[in-house]
Image (tube, helix red, strand yellow):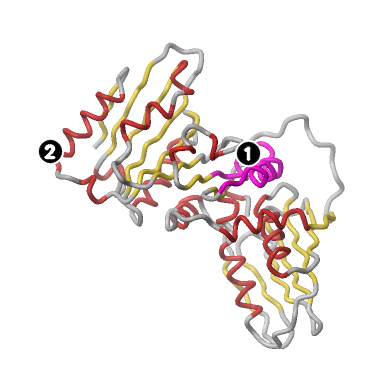
């Protein structure tokens, strides 16, 4: 069911939510958290709401969407409430904020928060430089950004590293889960030798590649070389050097990886790029700080760089925002 409330107020939205709850039962009692999505009112907004709806099937929640509209329009709030089949296992409140209200999201959110429920803030597109100091971020226990969706992903990742506060995380990190699992599993097989060095190859502006290299540098305590390529997207390969030979995991097509190591048969591994829904589901499983992510951010300072592939081309003055779907 979808209910539109044009030119409304948060008090009217709240009254409507109470009315729906009394009519349909105390559904809010089953909500485990409040997910606040902050985004511009653009073409990708529905994709992000759909991802939240799918995530809510594992984590029942109230989803509050702050869709920032034109700053030059007259001040008003257009609200929409979605429940039932149109909201997954959640209840979705979309607030389209116009004019001066577009920068007053915190005031609009507070009356709609579930009592005594944790708050998670998610910026699926362009996020704040310091999420913990953002008005919405100050309300949240967890703050989810996505460096891959920024105009300059590597610069955004660097800014997040400098501004990190426990509770921050980034979907560029979550996309690495399968890569990290495969590398750890490979090291658990004989001959159990010490890793002496590593090389991580990937797209030049892939924040996931940077974080994977930082993770290896921080936890293996060995020199890690970050190689940039222009011939493929996302992470392309990882090589861990050992005395008997290297462990090599290559994924040139973004779908299937090939794992090679001395004394073991070559294996083909499913390494599809993870979609936003799966990454969001994983992040909502924890509300405590991610110490491994924090350590991997610190590992970025330990990397050596190089390049491979096509000749470098002069970069345009401004780069359009990149879809996060193909970043890892």
Figure quadrant of residue 174: bottom right
| Residue 213, percent from left and from top | 71, 60
* Labels in figure, total: 2
User: Where does label 1 land, which residue?
Assistant: 150
Real-space CA distance between mark 1 and mark 2, rounded to the nearest whole angstrom: 42 Å
Is-magenta flag for residue 153? Answer: yes
Figure quadrant of residue 79: top left
Magenta residues (range):
145-165
Dot label at residue 222: none
The dominant secondary structure in magenta is: helix
Extreme residue toward the left, this view:
23
| Residue 47, percent from left and from top | 45, 41
Q: Is residue 31 above or below residue 256?
A: above
The mark that comes first in sequence, 1 or 2, is 2
Extreme residue toward the right, this view:
311
Task: Name the side, left or right, on which 306 lies relative to 118.
Answer: right
Placement of the N terminus among the 4 image quadrants: top left
| Residue 191, percent from left and from top | 71, 88
Task: Kindly identify the residue that appears in the image at 21 percent across and 29 percent down.
Answer: 16
Q: Mark 2, residues whose alpha carbon is within 10 Å: few (<14), some, or many (≥20)?
A: few
Dot label at residue 23: 2
Q: Is residue 55 above or below residue 138?
A: below
Placement of the C terminus among the 4 image quadrants: bottom right
Task: Name the side, left or right, on which 87 lies relative to 37.
Answer: left
Task: Name the side, left or right, on which 162 lies relative to 128.
Answer: right
Task: Kindly identify the residue that appears in the image at 72 percent across and 80 percent down.
Answer: 261
| Residue 144, percent from left and from top | 51, 46
| For the residues bearing labels 1 and 2, Cβ distance under 8 angstroms | no
Q: Circle 2 — which element?
A: helix
Task: Kindly identify the residue that appears in the image at 28 percent across and 49 percent down.
Answer: 31
Task: Kindly identify the residue that appears in the image at 63 percent across and 50 percent down.
Answer: 327
Q: Circle 1 — which element?
A: loop
């Amino acid at each position: 069911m979808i209910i539109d409330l044009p030119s409304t107020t948060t008090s009217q939205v709240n009254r409507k939510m109470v009315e729906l709850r009394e009519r349909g039962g105390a559904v809010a009692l089953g909500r485990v958290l409040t997910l606040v999505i902050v985004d511009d009112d653009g073409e990708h907004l529905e994709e992000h709401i759909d991802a939240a709806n799918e995530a809510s099937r594992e984590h029942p929640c109230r989803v509050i969407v702050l869709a920032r509209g034109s700053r030059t329009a007259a001040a008003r709030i257009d609200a929409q409430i979605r429940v039932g089949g149109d909201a997954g296992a959640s209840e979705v409140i979309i607030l389209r904020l116009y004019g001066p209200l577009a920068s007053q999201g915190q005031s609009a959110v507070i009356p709609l928060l579930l009592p005594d429920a944790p708050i998670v803030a998610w910026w699926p597109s362009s996020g704040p430089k310091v999420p913990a100091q953002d008005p919405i971020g100050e309300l949240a226990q967890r703050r989810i950004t996505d460096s891959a969706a920024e105009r300059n992903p590597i610069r955004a990742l660097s800014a997040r590293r400098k501004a990190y506060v426990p509770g921050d995380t980034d979907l560029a990190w979550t996309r690495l889960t399968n890569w990290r699992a495969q590398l750890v599993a490979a090291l658990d097989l004989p001959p159990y030798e010490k890793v002496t060095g590593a090389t991580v190859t990937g797209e030049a502006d892939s924040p996931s590649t940077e974080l994977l290299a930082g993770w290896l540098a921080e936890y293996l305590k060995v020199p890690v070389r970050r190689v940039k390529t222009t011939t493929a997207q996302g992470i392309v390969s990882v090589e861990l050097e050992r005395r008997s030979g290297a462990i090599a995991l290559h994924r040139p097509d973004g779908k299937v990886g090939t794992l090679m190591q001395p004394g073991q048969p070559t294996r083909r591994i499913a390494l599809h790029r993870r979609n936003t829904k799966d990454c969001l589901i994983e992040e909502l499983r924890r509300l405590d700080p991610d110490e491994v992510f924090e350590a991997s951010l610190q590992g970025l300072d330990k990397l050596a760089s190089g390049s491979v592939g096509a000749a470098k081309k002069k970069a345009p003055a401004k780069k359009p925002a990149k879809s996060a779907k193909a970043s890892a």
